Amino acid sequence: MTQQNLAHTTPAQLSFLDTLNPAQRQAATAGDGALLILAGAGTGKTRVLTARLAFLIGTGKARAHEILSVTFTNKAAKEMRERVSHLIGGVAENLWMGTFHSISVRILRRYAERIGLQSNFTILDTDDQLRLCKQLLQAENLDEKKYPPRVLAGIISRWKDKAWLPSQVPAIESAQMDGYAPKLYKAYQARLQTLNAVDFGDLLLHTVTLFLNHADALQHYQQQFRYVLVDEYQDTNVAQYLWLRLLAQGHGNLCCVGDDDQSIYGWRGAEVENILRFSTDFPTAVTIRLEQNYRSTPHILGAASGLISYNEGRLGKTLWTETDTGEPVHVVSCWDGADEARRVGEEIEQLQRKQHTLKDMAILVRAGYQTREFEERLLTIGVPYRVIGGLRFYERQEIKDALAYLRLIYQPRDALAFERIINVPKRGVGTAALQSIYQFANFQEISLVEAAALMVDKGEFRGAVKSTMRVFLEGLQRWRKQATELSPSELAGIVLDESGYTRMWKEDKSPDAAGRLENLKELVAALEQFDTLGGFLEHVSLVTDTANTDTDEMVSIMTLHSAKGLEFPTVFLPGWEEGVFPSKRSLDEKGTDGLEEERRLAYVGITRARERAYIFHVNNRRIYNQWQSMSPSRFINELPAEHVAQEGLAGVQQRRFDGSSWGNSASDTRRVASPKPQLAWQDEGFKKSAFEKGERVYHASFGYGDVLDCQRDRVRVAFDEGGEHIIMVSFIKKVA
């Protein structure tokens, strides 16, 4: 059939096929039926998907409006439409191309009355959803602190991703929110229908419901769409899976493009099983593997392929490339987070000196809280950067809230700080109460804190507000006194706990709550570097001001999840330690499935690199005011030795993830560090040492510094340029 179509097409119309490699051409010109294109990282999947669309139209197998092409972003849909238009020599306006949601809107507008809506229904945004959830909780007299609206919205969205109507929620799920969730879900849907509105989850859920309950509507689109193509199939959830299967039951021409090794969004509903069972769902399906990589060097591909091979839940493929071997993947062992940030900064500066541009470099972290030390280090050495897919550390909501508490303690007349946190956590101080404080303060020409205190004494506040306000003001007085007695780090921990701010986020069950708590812990750790609260606040002000830059020449900092689909000549991958990456939370919540998704995330990280990749791990981290010994990630052990070059720390025993030694063979190029330093500076063992506190010392790597604390075989040194480090005494010498 393919050859017959080709016979009726001029060579000029299909000249784009000549630019494809054999596997790509096979995928673009494959015959009818179910087709799975397993496209490895950097193998040109977008080119193949575009070529297949152009091939179907160019050979007359289908007209533009008979093809449905589904992408995950509107940007991807726009780019693909432009590419297809270029290939076929005309505008592909009649193509049904877009996201699951945008296509669902078109379908539902036509059949709205079948699902109890009018065609002019509105689509709620996140704020509208939360407001509606809040109203429903109030109607049921449920405490919002115990049952947060954001949690309810998250549960409902997850159930819709599973394609569950209120009547279909399984019994095992019904216990959510102490059993109230199913009833609230039913009320939520009823309220949406009254409002003639839908949320984003409804767009898919209603379309699936329409297709299941109204055969004529399903048949209409099955007959129209002779070919259905979908990109990033590994990221589909249950509702999207059902949506596609129902449409594909017509002609059976479903082409799915994806990579099971890059399925990293399980936390937001993606089901890697959708792509793994494709051949089971479609027994006659053809699977074509795209394995020639056009992005990375053989060393990078070899390291990534060796790592992902440890996953059992995968279809399997072997990436290869015709490019030069390139540099091995560098695995770098560091003392702590500060040393890690310093060494990343040094590598960036060295690459700059070799005429590499900053925009070609990226730092990819597992979690958002990890960005802080890299941001501050890059600012210190004057390297511009941008945080992609998120805010800079000191611009995040929870950090600005915490800083407002500290600012108000340091400067009681800081009206902006007072206004920001007077009702965070909620103390019943609404707009009217705050306005009255402002008016009283202006009349008396005093600060807002002083005004609030006088109003409490005069009985200007009523009920619970009076008591909560008094507790807050007493806390401010107590913390201000403690600021003269405690370190800034200790003070911050106390303030966050006693104010109820930490508890507020612990009780918040939204997906981003855990990340906010990690950021707060990182803030407390950042304060350890400062002797005074004023010094820290001044530092933050300067950092925030310096961060503003208009240049495009910047290092990119982002999470591994945000980096999917991107590529850079140079990639830095810090934080490869057990508990950080793989994430302890992922392992605790999902077990083996969580571990395999974390490994896929590591695979994605390595394959973002075109020319060089650096993996960093530290021996110890300061986590919430406590030093913790860290073991290198098990993923480091899984990297093939022939593709890795390791940089260890002098004087540190080399260990594997499991604790066993790498051995002393000179040919072992993959040694990684896993020391377990004792960091309790108050221990008796620190009293005797060959060095004394305050002595000037020199280290070959870190340079000159001053001894802060001593133990028999280790000292803690504040180096002039390298920060604080714990050093074996045999590796430093006294300076006369």
Image (cartoon, rainbow, N blue to C red):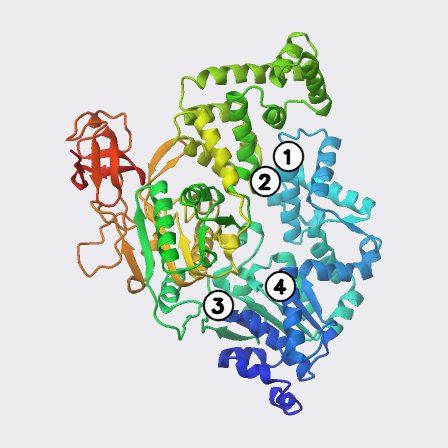
Alpha carbons under labels 1 and 4: distance apart? 35 Å
Asked if residue 656 is positioned above or below residue 67 in the image, the reply reads: above
Q: In what element is the residue under mark 3? A: loop
Residue receiving disc 1: 148
CB of mark 2 within 8 Å of CB of mark 3?
no
Q: In what element is the residue under mark 4? A: helix
Decide if residue 494 is on the left or right side of residue 91.
left
**Which residue is drawn at the image coordinates 71% and 33% (left, top)?**
137
**Which residue is drawn at the image coordinates 51% and 43% (left, top)?**
547
Alpha carbons under labels 2 and 3: distance apart? 34 Å
Q: Amino acid at mark 1?
A: Pro
Residue 241 sits in quarter = bottom right
Relative image position of residue 555 (x, y in whole percent): 46, 52
> Which callout, 3 or 1, points at the residue further toward the start of the chain?
3
Residue receiving disc 4: 76
Relative image position of residue 660 (x, y in whole percent): 24, 49
Residue 283 visible: no
> Which callout, 3 or 4, points at the residue further toward the start of the chain?
3
Q: In what element is the residue under mark 2? A: loop
Q: Amino acid at mark 2?
A: Ser
Q: For residue 510, which numbered disc appears in the image?
A: 2
CB of mark 2 within 8 Å of CB of mark 1?
yes
Residue 139 vs residue 343, the one in the foreground: 343
Alpha carbons under labels 4 and 2: distance apart? 29 Å
Q: In what element is the residue under mark 1? A: loop
Residue 430 vs residue 237, the one in the foreground: 430
